[in-house]
Image: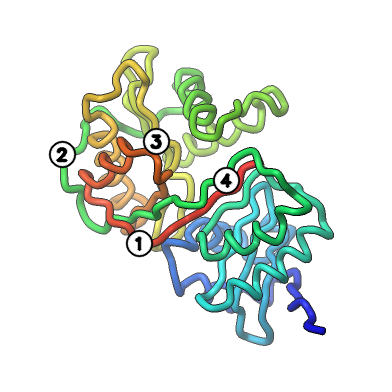
Amino acid sequence: MLRTPAARVLDETDEPAVRRLLATDPVAACVIAGRVEAAGTGAASLGAPLWGLGSGRSLEAVCLAGANLIPFALPGSEGAAAAAFAHRARRAGRRCSTIVGPAASVDPLWELLAPSWGPARDHRPHQPLLAIEGPPAIAPEPRVRPVGLAELDVLLPAAVAMFTEEVGVSPLRVDDGAGYRARVADLVRAGQSLAWIEGDEVVFKADIGAVSRSVCQVQGVWVAPAHRGRGIGAAGTAAVVEYARTAIAPLVSLYVNDFNGPARAAYARVGFREVGRFASVLF
C-alpha cells in the first residue's frame, strides 16, 4: 500500500530552501515570496503555517495555509504535493476563503479536497498569468496616482464594488467590513493603491497587492461602470505598470479570468504577455 507523502510545518531554518524553491518561478510564486521576504518562514511571524514537502536542504513544494490556501510546486511534483497538502488540509479543516495559485498545483489539490470541502461557490480553472517587463506599450493615464490616506473614504466604495463584482460576494459581510477596510488602508499607506479620482468619484482603481524583490502583482483593477468602453482600463493599467516598475519591482504581473474578454484585450494593449496559468477555487 502506497503511503501519502508527508508535509511538515516549516520553520525559520527552512527559509533558504524556501527561497531557492520560489526563485524557480518568481512570477508564479510572487505572493508567497513577498510574505517570506517580509516575515520569514516561521508560522508565528508569517501569521499562518507554511507547509513544505521535501527533505534536508531541498524542497519540492510549499503551501501557505492562511486566509488563502496557496500551493506552489516544482514541475513534476504537483501530484505528490497535492496528496501531502490535502492530507494536512483535511485534518485542519477548511479555514480559507480561496485556494489560489498556479493551476498545475491547484487543480490536483482541489480534486482531492473537493469530496470533503466541496462544493465550491465558484471554480475558475483557467486564469492566464500575465507579465510585463519594461515600459507599457501605450501611453499611461496621467491622472492615475497613489491614493492618499485622507482619500480612504472616497476609495473604499469603489474597492467594495470591485471586490463584489470580481468575487461574487461583498467584503462587508464579515465583521461589517472592518478587516477589508484595514486591508485597503494598509495598501494606501504602503503606496500600493492607485486611482484616478475626480471629486468624490473613483473613475479607475488598482492595487499592487503582492510585492517581492523582483516581481509585483497587480490586483483589483476596476473601472467605474459609467466610464467603461472608453479605454480607461488599458490607460489606467499602463499608469500602474509605469509606477510599479519604477517604484516597486521591475517585473509586473497579474492574472485574469479567461472569460473576461475586455480585460484580456486591455492587458494585451498595455503589453502584458502570458507566462503561465493560475486557478482559483472560491468558497
Q: Earlier in the sequence, mark 4 or mark 2?
A: 4
Instruction: Please provide percent x and percent y for residue 101.
Output: 53, 57
Q: Earlier in the sequence, mark 2 or mark 1?
A: 2
Residue 65 is left or right of residue 22, and the answer is right
Real-space CA distance between mark 4 and mark 2, rounded to the nearest whole angstrom: 35 Å
Q: Secondary structure at mark 1?
A: strand
Residue at 46% in and 59% down: 212
Residue furthest out toward the top: 199
Residue 194, label in figure? none
Residue identifier under label 1 = 275
The amino acid type of the residue labelled 3 equals: Val
The amino acid type of the residue labelled 1 equals: Val
Q: Is residue 156 above or below residue 179?
A: above
Residue at 22% in and 50% down: 271
Towards the viewer: 194 or 108? 108
* Of the two numbered discs 4 and 2 in the rendering, the one whose residue sits closer to the viewer: 4
Real-space CA distance between mark 2 and mark 3, rounded to the nearest whole angstrom: 17 Å
Q: Earlier in the sequence, mark 2 or mark 3?
A: 2
The amino acid type of the residue labelled 2 equals: Ala
Residue identifier under label 4 = 123
Residue identifier under label 2 = 139
Q: Residues within 10 Å of mark 4 (few under 14, many from 20)?
A: some
Real-space CA distance between mark 3 and mark 4, rounded to the nearest whole angstrom: 20 Å
Q: Secondary structure at mark 3?
A: strand
* Of the two numbered discs 2 and 3 in the rendering, the one whose residue sits closer to the viewer: 3
**In terms of image quadrants, where is residue 173?**
top right
* Of the two numbered discs 3 and 1 in the rendering, the one whose residue sits closer to the viewer: 1
Residue 221, label in figure? 3
* Of the two numbered discs 2 and 1 in the rendering, the one whose residue sits closer to the viewer: 1
Residue at 61% in and 84% down: 58
Marks 1 and 2: in contact by CB < 8 Å? no
Q: Is residue 162 above or below residue 114?
A: above
